[in-house]
Image (spheres, helix red, strand yellow):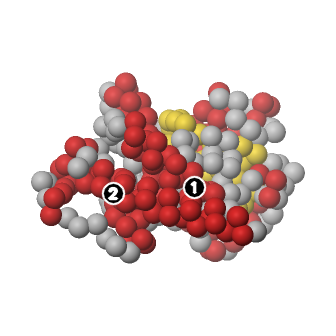
């Protein structure tokens, strides 16, 4: 017990060292230069560990997709791996699926060990560049590590144009417990009132992700509540489209019948809506 406690203390100190090293690296990183704007020598690193975490996350968020040094990747990956060891990673056998292979799970999608998790991306497909933003795109990009933005940039460079609404791309999960990330662009509703095209586009997000999952032979996919946050899609209707799209896809594709699909929610409101839908009851 004493040896375990000593090991944990040593690892905690190692984590603090990794965090401070990453902060120093990013302050002088050319990929962050447009934000730092030559002021790196004047910027003092926060002494408080929680503030330092936010500082590093902010720099990772604004970092352009340029290849970092091998040393940075090594330190970053060790830091993120140890961070994950300090959290509870939810395994599929901890989730209760119905006889259709569907489930509702309320939790942090970056700690879910599904074959793939779905990211609500923007049309640039490079992740959220707003420092410490609370959107799912920001969280996934942060805890996957800078490799994810690099992979997305490579995909978009090959494509040569922005991603269309309702389409999807797949990348590795890197430092996430999920093996893959499915990135899809949902419809944005300036007025919060969906049109017929918005409904079609949102349904297409789900089918596009499932098609990619099927192509890759994946056995489980976790969907976030696509378009319901910053993109303002009404929660109830978005959930109805999501559940109907997944059920129809599984019905139309025999090879998807055994695929497990998780509807990941953050808010109690969404959990209640999805639970009623999966139970066959109309959400009020």
The residue carrying mark 1 is 82
Front one among 64 and 56: 56
Q: In what quadrant of the picture does the C terminus appear? A: bottom right
Query: Against 212, is 21 above or below?
Result: below
Q: In what quadrant of the picture does the N terminus appear? A: bottom right
Residue 282 visible in the snapshot: no
Front one among 207 and 31: 31
**Residue appearing at x 64%, y 66% in the figure:** 6
Q: Hey, which quadrant is residue 191 in on the image?
A: bottom left
Residue 169 in the image: state x and y as whole percent: 50, 35
Residue 280 in the image: state x and y as whole percent: 80, 62
Q: Hey, which quadrant is residue 9 in on the image?
A: bottom right
Q: Hey, which quadrant is residue 107 in on the image?
A: bottom right
Residue 234 visible in the snapshot: yes
The residue carrying mark 2 is 23
User: Element at badge 2?
Assistant: helix
Left/right of residue 160 with respect to residue 241 in the rendered view: left
Query: Against 23, is 282 above or below?
Result: below
**Residue appearing at x 70%, y 53% in the figure:** 262
Front one among 170 and 77: 77
In the rendered image, the residue lying farthest to the right is 99
Residue 192 in the image: state x and y as whole percent: 43, 65
User: Element at badge 1?
Assistant: helix
**Residue appearing at x 39%, y 44% in the figure:** 72
Label 2 environment density (alpha carbons within 10 Å; few <14, some 14–19, many ≥20): many
Label 1 environment density (alpha carbons within 10 Å; few <14, some 14–19, many ≥20): some
Label located before the other in sequence (1 or 2): 2
């Amino acid at each position: 017990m004493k040896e375990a406690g000593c090991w944990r203390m040593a690892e905690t100190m190692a984590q603090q060292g990794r965090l401070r090293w990453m902060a120093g690296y990013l302050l002088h990183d050319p990929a962050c230069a447009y934000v730092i704007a030559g002021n790196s020598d004047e910027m003092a690193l926060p002494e408080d560990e929680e503030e330092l975490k936010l500082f590093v996350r902010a720099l990772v968020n604004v970092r352009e997709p340029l290849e970092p040094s091998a040393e940075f990747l090594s330190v970053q990956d060790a830091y993120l791996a140890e961070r994950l060891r300090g959290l509870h990673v939810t395994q599929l056998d901890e989730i209760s699926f119905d006889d259709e292979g569907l489930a509702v799970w309320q939790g942090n999608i970056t700690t879910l060990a599904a074959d793939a998790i779905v990211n609500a991306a923007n049309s640039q497909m490079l992740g959220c560049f707003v420092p410490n933003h609370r959107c799912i795109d920001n969280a996934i990009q942060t805890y996957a590590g800078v490799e994810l933005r690099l992979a997305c940039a490579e995909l978009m460079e090959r494509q040569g144009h922005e991603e269309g609404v309702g389409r999807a791309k797949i990348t590795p999960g890197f430092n996430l417990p999920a093996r893959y990330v499915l990135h899809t662009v949902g419809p944005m509703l300036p007025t919060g009132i969906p049109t017929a095209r918005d409904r079609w586009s949102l349904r297409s997000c789900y089918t596009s992700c499932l098609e990619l999952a099927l192509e890759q032979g994946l056995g489980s996919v976790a969907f976030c509540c696509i378009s319901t946050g910053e993109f303002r899609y009404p929660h109830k209707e978005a959930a109805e489209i999501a559940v109907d799209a997944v059920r129809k896809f599984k019905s139309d594709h025999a090879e998807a019948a055994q695929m497990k699909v998780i509807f990941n929610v953050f808010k109690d409101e969404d959990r209640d809506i999805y639970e009623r839908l999966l139970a066959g009851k109309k959400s009020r």
